[in-house]
Image (spheres, rainbow, N blue to C red):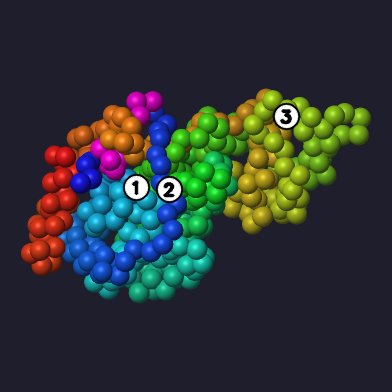
């Protein structure tokens, strides 16, 4: 039997670091399991909304402890990257906006690209104003842009799910994959706890800690962000001179012992647009179409080498999964928070409208989680 130390999330003592292994598994969840997952998930969601409200459901979804506990309670693999895609897919299929006041948009692969149009449809169903719908579309796009462009750890997003409530609050659960090590990284966002898209915006990031990560949303990158904006506001022809000067060596020649490499494919057309728009801040800069990972790296490089303002290289990962048994000695676990998540689910399951056998099986899994 799977014990809690095998899958529930732990935190390393050093802040903002951790280890997690979410292997990219092929295949699909069997139909018989998905049917049961849907029945249990719907019951749990309805109980949470009835007892605690919609805001609490969004908080729980954005909590990596609770999200992982939910996935395991529903019976899915404890450590697979599929926990993210299957659990969000199940929730999307069973949550009815007219019944719950909450809608789920997006999904895996091509479905993630349909998120904006789904937000519009869901917003209309929920009776949201045009301004609130526009704000949610912007939040969806920016959360994806941040994790693809401003936080560069080698993980490309392939899954994006946007949770939206009729009061205008939202949460995001999205996941990226690293094709080289075959691992995944999950990002959690929560609107009510986010003050800014470009300064420590995440509720949590779960994944394997990388040695070097370009983290432009770290507090330590503030000056680098400001310089990047200043550079982007200049004429691109002047910026080109920073890259290669006939009478001097190019910046590339100074990078032999560095991690940050000046890309050859800087999007100069995007910088021309930035020059025309004159962005006021870093958020406006990276929201411009065409400002991608290479351009962000290039601006950070110039900020570092020319102006002496380097970016942060600290991986923003905060949460990890603790291994046990044959996988090695587990890392320290925050047992209080873990027990709270389990107890919360236990109450929800006991009140859920499911058959007795499914209820007992779910409670049995929770008992295994708590007591081992």
Q: Position of residue 87 (x, y in %)?
A: 32, 59
Lower sequence index among marks 1 and 3? 1
The residue pinned by badge 2 equals 23
Q: Position of residue 16 (x, y in %)?
A: 41, 32
- Are the residues tagged 2 and 1 within 8 Å (C-beta)? yes
**Could you classify mark 1 by the number of other residues whose Cα lies within 10 Å: few (under 14), some (14-19), or many (20 or more)?**
many
Q: Which mark is residue 174?
A: none
The residue closer to the viewer here, 293 or 207, is 207
**Could you classify mark 2 by the number of other residues whose Cα lies within 10 Å: few (under 14), some (14-19), or many (20 or more)?**
some
Identify the residue at horizontal 73%, vertical 51% (top origin). Answer: 267
Q: SS for tag 1?
A: loop
The residue pinned by badge 1 equals 79
Q: Is residue 8 magenta?
A: yes
Above or below for 156 versus 308: below
Q: Position of residue 221 (x, y in %)?
A: 56, 32
Question: What residue range appears in magenta?
Answer: 5-14
Mark 1 vs mark 3: in front = 1
Quarter of the rendering containing residue 294: top right
Mark 3 vs mark 2: in front = 2
CA gap between label 3 and label 2 equals 33 Å
Q: Position of residue 57 (x, y in %)?
A: 26, 55
In the image: residue 228, left or right of residue 244 = left
Q: Is residue 237 magenta?
A: no
The residue pinned by badge 3 equals 255
CA gap between label 2 and label 1 equals 7 Å
């Amino acid at each position: 039997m799977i014990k809690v130390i095998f899958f529930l999330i732990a935190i390393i003592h050093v802040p903002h670091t951790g280890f997690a292994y979410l292997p990219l598994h092929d295949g699909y969840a069997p139909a018989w399991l998905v049917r049961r997952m849907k029945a249990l998930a719907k019951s749990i969601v309805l109980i949470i909304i009835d007892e605690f409200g919609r805001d609490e459901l969004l908080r729980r979804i954005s909590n990596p402890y609770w999200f992982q506990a939910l996935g395991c309670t529903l019976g899915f693999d404890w450590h697979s990257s599929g926990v993210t895609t299957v659990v969000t897919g199940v929730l999307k299929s069973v949550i009815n906006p007219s019944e719950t006041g909450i809608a789920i948009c997006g999904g895996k692969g091509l479905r993630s690209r349909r998120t904006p149009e789904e937000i519009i449809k869901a917003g209309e169903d929920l009776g949201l104003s045009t301004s609130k719908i526009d704000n949610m579309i912007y939040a969806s796009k920016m959360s994806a842009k941040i994790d693809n462009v401003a936080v560069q750890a080698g993980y490309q997003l392939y899954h994006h799910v946007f949770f939206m409530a009729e009061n205008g609050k939202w949460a995001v659960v999205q996941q990226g994959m690293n094709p080289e090590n075959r691992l995944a990284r999950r990002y959690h966002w929560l609107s009510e706890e986010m003050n800014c898209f470009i300064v420590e915006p995440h509720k949590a990031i779960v994944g394997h800690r990388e040695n070097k990560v370009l983290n432009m949303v770290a507090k330590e990158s503030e000056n680098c962000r400001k310089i990047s904006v200043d550079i982007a506001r200049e004429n691109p022809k002047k910026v080109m001179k920073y890259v290669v000067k006939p009478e001097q060596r190019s910046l590339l020649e100074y990078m032999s012992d560095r991690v940050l490499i000046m890309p050859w494919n800087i999007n100069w057309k995007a910088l021309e647009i930035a020059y025309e728009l004159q962005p006021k801040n870093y958020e406006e800069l990276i929201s411009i179409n065409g400002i991608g990972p290479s351009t962000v790296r290039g601006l950070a490089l110039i900020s570092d080498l020319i102006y002496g303002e380097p970016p942060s290289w600290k991986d923003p990962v905060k949460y990890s999964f603790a291994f046990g048994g044959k996988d090695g000695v587990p890392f320290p676990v925050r047992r209080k928070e873990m027990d709270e998540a389990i107890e919360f689910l236990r109450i929800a399951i006991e009140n859920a409208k499911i058959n007795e056998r499914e209820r007992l099986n779910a409670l049995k899994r929770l008992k295994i989680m708590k007591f081992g």
